[in-house]
Amino acid sequence: MVEVLHEIGLRIKGLREACDVTREEMARDLEVPLETYERWEETGEDVPISAIYHMAHKFGVEFTEILTGTAAKLDTYQVVRWGEGREVDRYPGYHFEDLAWRYSGKIMQPLLVVLDPSDEPAKLVTHSGQEFNLVLEGCVVVTWGDKEFELCAGDSIYFNPEHPHGQRCGGDVPAKFVTIIAE
């Protein structure tokens, strides 16, 4: 998990430098103390999702580029494998950035979910909006419609949750993932 978060911090720093913006300017823009912003770049820890959306917009990249290093479009589902390519079945014309600002003020803060191997498989649910899951530790099996994806630390999935979906632990040790839902 630390490695995943550290790489998020490095991507934030790289994008900021590429856009020729100082740390002081970013801290002012995000209305946080300079020390807080510097910690985000150094460790990637405790960066609010609202700040990541704001930075993505400012740097002209998509939300997932900061989280995973891979630009992603709004899809029926999309799996981004840690260090690999991606599987795509997309709805054309939408981007994470569009979604973030279209639902401005309605973006939920991330929810950390811990799944135990002894848990029953999740009941499949549906809801409106878009859902993004990033696995931090262990393995998570995500069921989406009639597909199943086994995701391990660093993998993510972005999907339209109007299709039945659920998550369960995919191994012998507890799994942790972050879920973000834009209603």
Image (tube, grey):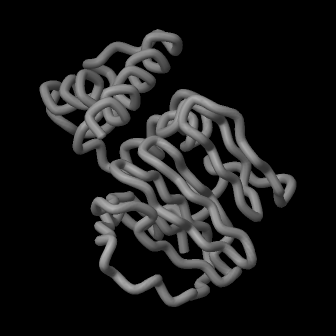
Q: Quadrant of the N terminus?
A: top left
Query: Which residue is more in the foreground, 95 or 119?
Result: 119
Q: Could you tell me which residue is drawn at 62 percent across and 33 percent down?
A: 70
Q: Is residue 150 above or below residue 119?
A: above
71 left or right of 87? left
What is the tally of numbered marks visible in this picture? 0
Residue most extreme to the front: 172
> Taking 26 as reference, is 162 left or right?
right
Residue 130: quarter of image: bottom right
As displayed, is residue 113 above or below residue 16?
A: below
Question: Residue 94: where, in percent of width, then height?
Answer: 76, 54
The x, y position of residue 148, in whole percent, is 65, 67
Q: Position of residue 55 (x, y in %)?
A: 45, 35
| In the image: residue 175, left or right of residue 64 | left
**Which of these two is toward me, 175 or 14?**
175
Q: Residue at x 79, y 50 (%)?
A: 88
Depth order, front residue of 173/46: 173
Split into 4 quadrants, where in the image is the C terminus? Answer: bottom right
User: In the picture shown, does residue 120 fall above or below 171?
Assistant: below
- 168 vs 34, left or right, is right
Farthest residue toward the right? 92
Residue 8 visible in rendering = yes
Q: Quadrant of residue 150?
A: bottom right
Does any portion of residue 101 appear in the rendered image? no
Residue at 33% from the left image edge and 60% from the top image edge:
175
> At 26% from the left edge and 34% from the top edge, which residue is drawn?
2
